[in-house]
Amino acid sequence: MENKKDVCNEIIRRSGVNPRKCMKCGKCSGTCPAYDEMEYHPHQFVYMVETGDIEPLLKSKSIYRCLSCFACIDRCPRGVEPAKIVEAVRLSVIREQGNNHLKADDLPAMLDEDLPQQAIVSAFRKYSK
Amino acid sequence: MQKITREALIEKAAALLSEGKVDRVLGWKSGEFSYDVTPAIFNNVEEMQKDFVYGDFSGANFSKYLVKETKKDGKVLIFLKPCDTYSFNQLLTEHRFDREKVYAVGIPCDGMIDENKIKQAVGDGILSIVSESETVKVETLYDGVKELNRADVFSERCLNCKSKKHVAYDELIGEDGLVLDSNRFDEVAKLEKMTADERFAFWQNELSRCIRCNACRDICPACTCEKCVFDNPNSGVENKAAANSFEEKMFHIIRAFHVAGRCTDCGECSRVCPQHIPLHLLNRKFIKDINTFYGDYQAGAEVGSRAPLVNYTKEDIEPSEAVNRGDE
Amino acid sequence: MQVNEYKPKIVAFCCNWCSYAGADLAGSNRLAYPAEVKVIRVPCSCRVNPMFILRAFQRGADGVILCGCHPGDCHYTSGNYYTRRRMALLFSMLEYLGIEKERTRVEWVSAAEGAKFAATMNDFVATVKSLGENKRLEDLRCKR
Amino acid sequence: MQRIGVFVCWCGSNIAGTVDVQAVSDALGKEPGVVFSTNYQYMCSQAGQDMIKQAIKEHNLTGIVICSCSPRMHEATFRKTAAAAGINPYMVEIANIREQCSWIHKDMKEGTEKAIVLGRTAIAKVHLNTPLVPGESPVTKRALVIGGGIAGIQTALDIADAGFYVDIVEKKPTIGGKMAQLDKTFPTLDCAACILTPKMVDVAQHERIRIFSYSEVEHVSGFVGNFDVTIKKKARYVKEDVCTGCGLCTEKCPQKKVPNEFNLGMDNRRAIYIPFAQAVPKVATIDADYCTMLKTGKCGVCSKVCTAKAIDYTQKDEFIEEKYGAIVAATGFNPISMDKFDEFAYSQSKDVITSLEFERLMNAAGPTAGKLVRPSDGVHPHKIVFVQCVGSRCAACAEKGKEYCSKICCMYTAKHAMLTRDKYPDTDVTVFYIDVRTPGKQFDEFYRRAVEEYGVHYIKGMVGKVSPEGNKLIVQGSDLIANKQLKIEADLVVLAAAIEPDKSARPLATMLTASMDTNDFFTEAHPKLRPVESPTAGIFLSGACQGPKDIPETVSQAGAAAAKVIGLLSKDKLTGNPCVAHSDEMMCNGCSTCEKVCPYGAITYQDKEFRGPNRTTLIRRVAQVNEAVCQGCGCCTVACPSGAMDLKGFASKQIMAEVDAICK
Amino acid sequence: MRKCSLSNSTALFNKIAENATLYIPVDLEKGRVAYKKYADGMKMSDALKTDRSAKDFFFPQTENLMEFKTEGKSIEIIDNRSEAEDFVVFGVRACDVKSLEVLDKVFLAEPVDSYYKNRREHGVIVSMACTRPTETCFCGTFGIDASAPKGDIECYKTDDAFYFNAVTEKGEALLAKLDGVTESSDEKAVNEQKEQIKKVLDKLPLKDLKADEFGADKTDKFFNSPEWKNLSEACLGCGTCTFVCPTCQCYDIKDFKTNKGVQRFRCWDSCMYSDFTKMSAGQPRLTQMERFRQRFMHKLVYFPTNNDGMFSCVGCGRCVAKCPISMNIVKVMKTLGGKNND
């Protein structure tokens, strides 16, 4: 499918990640704290984007299980940055649904007082590119 | 920015001379008119009080004189504007003068005036030029006093000043400035955007005026060869005058290539060209390419740095890519 | 009859260790390339001074090609890396002056790449031929 | 003006088939300066060569142009011919009219025309040729080996056995290097000490080998065949020639709390020590950082107990100057620091150790006398996890790991796993791997035995995190085959740390003007064809300082380096290539540009006095080329803006004359 | 005196260009002024001076002298001189007119330089008075009257017309051909302009510069002056002053190897260059101080000594304006010329 390839390229472009750098060591998945929640795991995200087999990933809930803790980015020996891929995949799905662009102005109302700063920033990263 | 006065510099020199820290001063000497300032050696304060000037026309980059000056006995005081300090460092990197024999005083600079721009603006018969903060008053033989905007008559290199920061000095007068984000590559980029034919026509027109007086080479602080290849009958490229457009190009390409990676973009070449050829556009092309291909590099920013042409990485751009990138 | 066929003059600088040997191999394998190509042997591509290239154009060359060992394979360990930088800058400058960029080329040819040498020369000659005579860097005196 | 003779070869029909050789020799005979021109069937034959010799004599030729096959084929032949006839061999130029003309062109006219141009080009060059004489330099018949590990030991022994003197400089108190710390060696499992220590003794007893232990190279100057080296012999406060190595002092020294580097700090030694029982030289050394006597002037126990009176608290660093003909770098490797790998809890838990530490734990002479116990509590571990590729193949972060594969870890991990299972069948062993790389004789068989016979669990995947919990270590990693994340409770975690060149290599390389890669491994002169030589003439490479290596590879490279050194030292004089760079001092401005591009460090600068105008003298800094070191690439000639630097045999004027001739 | 209204100038130029190549000063971009070959409709510049002097027309920067053709071992000498075509240089100022007199002394004295003579014979100079001399002008110092330059034809340009007066035979011949586009006129306007110019000349900053101290046979007086050292200290040794100078006449003869032989040409040389007059023993003047001294001594002392007191400086001021370090003959004269110039 032509479209599938476009989606993959778009994900690669948007994330700035080169999945070919992956040497398939699995350290990202060995690191991931949300591993058990996921159907597909960080090393698989990368592989799926690399091979273009992206459809199942787009449909999978796994992408929302990622906490954006960036442990995989920190630990990856090849600098592949799987979390950025996940984020880009998420974005593709969200954009597809037209739910793009969370406005900063809308935020204060949605904010919980107790919400940690980091989570806000992470949410921004997740939803408002 | 603090304005540096002639008196402040004389005072500084007087102190250094009397302390015995320096034996003579390399400075600017007044001339017949407001603008014809000559580099000169002052041996004492009296000489300075008589003829020393500092002002809008003290643009000459003195660094190169150090090659000759430090061969003499004693220590010389030199005043360095920010752009001069880069040449100073570059010459040091190339072991061209003895640092021990120089006392360098950094002085701030807010730009120098191009007398040609004044001449163009007011015409013949300039009797005096007096600079005020924002304006320049020019008294002429035919049209009385004319007032010009100072910014309009700044020399090209000052309009595109790359740095107000001194990268070398023993002592600094006033406050140091910053390295600036200049638009100095805009002209180059504009040329790059032209078609090859247009570029060829542009350079043909510019270089055809060259009279091979060698002023660009002889003023250049990077050109300090004992004997230039163009003066050396054994080099195979020696010539005294360009017989045709090839030789015009040959001279300027090779000259620019020889200073590539070493040129600090001080702009002296263009300033002194009696034919007003924009020679800096050749040097800047190399600088721009070097920055794009090999990462930002400012010659003279630090002593001892390895120039891009005597360096490499395994991942360097291929020449074929390099020429295509120029098109973008 | 091809009486008036335009024959460009091509100067090829080849490093002794890789490209000159590659050219020899092209010969040994009888891989033809145009006779317009004349090779000058230099110890290393880094021996080639930009002045030589300009000199060739001055004297009437229509194209100049430089061949050296592949980056990393230089007999002198690093010569071709310097060549690469020098020529990238020189060619870019020539282009900037409006000289056709197709007239100059750097190609890495190993001692085993006889076929690449021949193919490169065939391609280069064809390219230069399509440009026609070198007018922008010529010295008419030389043609007298 | 030269008197040039032109000799056109037919090469049977190889050339004459597509080139009209008669037309070529006629045309070239008309060129200015050509006084004789002929053609012949086979110029390289004896008859052809005789023809050249005769023509040289008859026509008083000063320059020779041979139009024939490639100079790569017969340049040497014709140079010898010219020399035999009494003219300088470098007055010969070859026009390649076979490989680059007759063989590629089918048209006779085209081939002939091109051959004439090529001939004319060679004539143009010969006009500017000058006689060249290769420089000669004597060879000091002594080699220096820097580093006393197995690489240095083997190189030194091989050189010395060939009859040359060798000095070994070792910065530690004893030679032996990393191999002395190892327990067993793969894939044969023989004991490292059993095969190394006899060699150490051989070295000590060899009449042509001197060991400078506890010493470092301070300064190097000179060039191939003639290096001047200053060696700093650090003060060990013990007279080497007097100490008997009885070891009494090392038992009586009251300073007991010095971390024992030989056991990687896993136990302590005294302030005066002998690193290990088989040390060579077996001489005590006082650690000045810990010795109370040296620090406070109060103690002197060792001196009191020493019956040989070997202790000398006043000893100073000693500097020895020696000349060498060749230098071998054998500076070896070290495991990288694990400090930056927080995820493996190396600095948090004593029970996370490196493989080299594991090696000491298993060694009968180690801190636990060979008993495998947890460093934290001395309890026998029942579950051990090995993690491979820690810091190797790590491209993400240069200050953390290394981009390259450390090469030896797969094999020693298999060895450790196997030995553990062999000695302690009750201990469960798991290895996390990315790839298992076992190219080597008996290597893969060895690894398979670990799996198949010893039951080591190999898991394809990487450990993401190790967290200490109670007295256990929770190892979290992925199992890529099962597509599972594992959490293993381990007693001991062993990290296969990447290896890197010893820190002393970089400053040494600067002294030797030997080039290094970005990882600080020495670069070889050619990656395939000259793997044990540095590009800098006279500098050779042995062992892991050139790249990660196991013992058999190291030993074979050590032997190869020795062979190269022997080849060099067996010459009485070195004859250089005369086609080298030279600097015209009158034009040089000493800017140092040429020096920066010289891959051989052949260019130095000197302040020289020159006569200035009007009877003045000027002192100028000028470049000087060491002809013995220069290899003649010519890179400096282009770097030099003033044109002061030129290359003999390929001078700028010669090349330009060739250009002119081609473009005519 | 003939007159041609400015509105008719195109017709005038076209008329001149009918019979000879006409060169007029033209304004170029960025304030540059140069002589250009006239083409119909071209506008003449009102600028005072062209960047390069009229010297170029008679003594060009490079000039082929002869050729050698080589074929194998033979050599053929080819004299490629040919008769120059007629040309007119329009609007030459007094200083540049005078400079040709200086050059004549050199090139037309025995042995006559036939290349120069050829051009000189075929060139007609239409001189023009300077209505707006500039601050760098000092032709008066050398007795030159900027209000009445004597070319082959002297020309005055007023607000509305050109006025012409033939001075030489060549000038008369040319002026006669222009009868159709000119009319007869009195000299009133011209005399007024001359008066006007004289007033301006009196206001010039360099009006008091005197050359009296210099001249023939003053070598001993100046040669060993200690001032040369300070004056030359900043000199770069470039050739700018020489190459913009209308009277500098040094040249070098060189051979250029072509593909078929050798072309022998001459080109300007500069006594400021370190490789000037290279002889078998090298350059006679080894330091920049000596070279610097040579240039000014030649202009002010040696030339007058050999040429009946004629200075070889015409006070055009080009070197004053162009020197990269602003060192020039005015400063030299003021420094060495002592009391008269204080």
Image: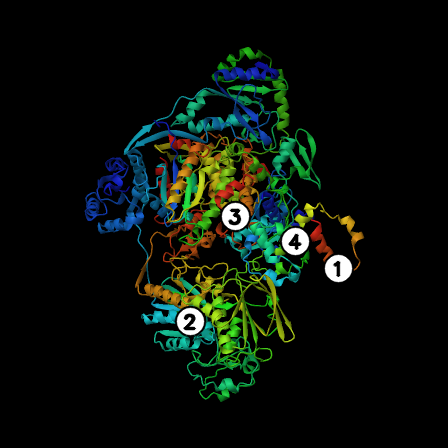
Nearer the viewer's eye, disc 1 or disc 4? 4
Check disc 4 and report the residue beneath it.
A60
Label placed on residue D626: none
**In this rendering, is residue B327 above or below D312?**
above
**In this rendering, is residue E28 above or below B130?**
above
- Do tags 4 and 2 sit on the same chain? no
Q: Classify residue D177 as left or right of residue D42.
A: right
Viewer-nearest residue: B127 or D149: D149
Check disc 3 and report the residue beneath it.
B261
Check disc 2 and report the residue beneath it.
D150
Q: Position of residue D608 (x, y in %)?
A: 43, 56
Nearer the viewer's eye, disc 3 or disc 2? 2
- Do tags 4 and 3 sit on the same chain? no
Q: Position of residue E131 (x, y in %)?
A: 61, 24
Q: Secondary structure at mark 1?
A: loop
Q: Classify residue A33 as left or right of residue D550.
A: right
- Do tags 3 and 2 sit on the same chain? no
For the residues labelled 4 and 2, the Cα–Cα distance comes to: 56 Å
Q: Classify residue D197 as left or right of residue E230.
A: left
Check disc 1 and report the residue beneath it.
A116
